[in-house]
Image: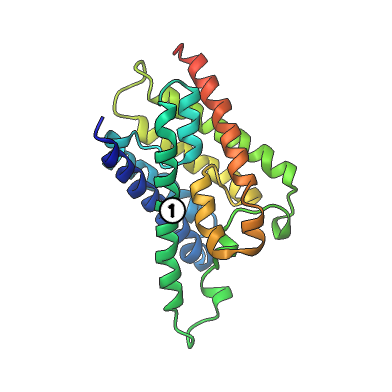
């Protein structure tokens, strides 16, 4: 394992790339006609790419729920969690700030924002509102999909799993889980990804952000524990 400073940098860069792909697709590609496939593909491919690029440096978490879930799985030391989570949140926020700068440069004479691109509020994770799902429904969704995600991570990175294919399995899992959950909660699974647009959006997304920390972390703990049991670790 590389030095801790390099591990934190890898988590920052990986989460920056993840939020760049996801929020960028949701802000620009989805309203241009790509629909929910755009962010689903973007998140899956972003994590796949960055897992190969920097996963050997930090383990390729890019997600506080994954970090905490891997502690439950016996794969990560708890004393390193705070540094990882701070790096992840800062990486996500940095990516969101880049897009805030890009959006500020949109030409006022161009198409209206509501038809040409989304806002940070529109791409944030929320419950209620236009999607119409209750807080309970969203919590159940986020707990279940994050638990499944951790089971995939722990299983695909097991010593008994085929070597070299873990990033592919993890990326495809994220794609599938986002297809399921975008219509319900805008798909979090990742508190760092949720925090970045919510801070810039303010209002309802920021007030509901706690749900998208608690539910994925609970799901991560459950999935990590199940993965540890299944793989006898």
Q: Residue at x 43, y 64 (%)?
A: 97
Q: Residue at x 72, y 59 (%)?
A: 129
Residue 14 in the image, given as x and y percentages of width and height: 35, 46
| Quadrant holding the N terminus | top left
Left or right of 42, for residue 205: right
Q: Give the residue at mark 1.
A: 92
164 above or below 65?
above
Which quadrant of the view contains residue 80?
Answer: top left
Left or right of 211, for residue 70: left
The reply to whether residue 57 is in sight is yes
Residue 115 in the image, given as x and y percentages of width and height: 56, 74
Q: Which of 122/42 is in front?
A: 122
Q: Which of 32/139 is in front?
A: 139
Q: How is the image coloured?
A: rainbow
Q: How many numbered badges does the structure rendering display? A: 1
> Please, which residue is most extreme toward the bottom here?
109
Disc 1 packing (10 Å; few <14; some 14–19; many ≥20): many
98 above or below 217?
below
Residue 198 in the image, given as x and y percentages of width and height: 56, 58
């Amino acid at each position: 394992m590389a030095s801790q400073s390099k591990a934190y940098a890898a988590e920052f860069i990986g989460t920056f790339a993840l939020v760049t792909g996801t929020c960028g697709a949701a802000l620009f590609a989805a309203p241009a006609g790509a629909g929910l496939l755009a962010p689903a593909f973007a998140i899956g491919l972003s994590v796949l790419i960055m897992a190969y690029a920097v996963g050997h440096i930090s383990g390729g978490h890019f997600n506080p729920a994954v970090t905490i879930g891997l502690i439950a799985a016996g794969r990560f030391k708890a004393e390193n969690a705070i540094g990882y989570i701070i790096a992840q949140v800062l990486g996500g926020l940095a990516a969101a700030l880049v897009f805030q700068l890009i959006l500020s440069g949109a030409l006022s004479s161009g198409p209206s924002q509501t038809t040409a691109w989304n806002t940070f509020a529109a791409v944030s994770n929320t419950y209620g509102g236009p999607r119409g799902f209750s807080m309970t429904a969203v919590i159940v969704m986020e707990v279940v999909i994050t638990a499944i995600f951790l089971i995939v991570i722990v299983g695909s990175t097991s010593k008994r799993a085929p070597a070299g294919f873990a990033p592919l399995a993890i990326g495809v899992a994220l794609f599938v889980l986002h297809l399921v959950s975008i219509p319900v909660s805008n798909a979090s699974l990742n508190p760092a990804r949720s925090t970045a647009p919510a801070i810039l959006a303010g209002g309802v997304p920021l007030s509901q952000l706690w749900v998208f920390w608690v539910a994925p972390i609970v799901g991560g703990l459950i999935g990590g524990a199940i993965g540890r049991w299944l793989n006898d670790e």
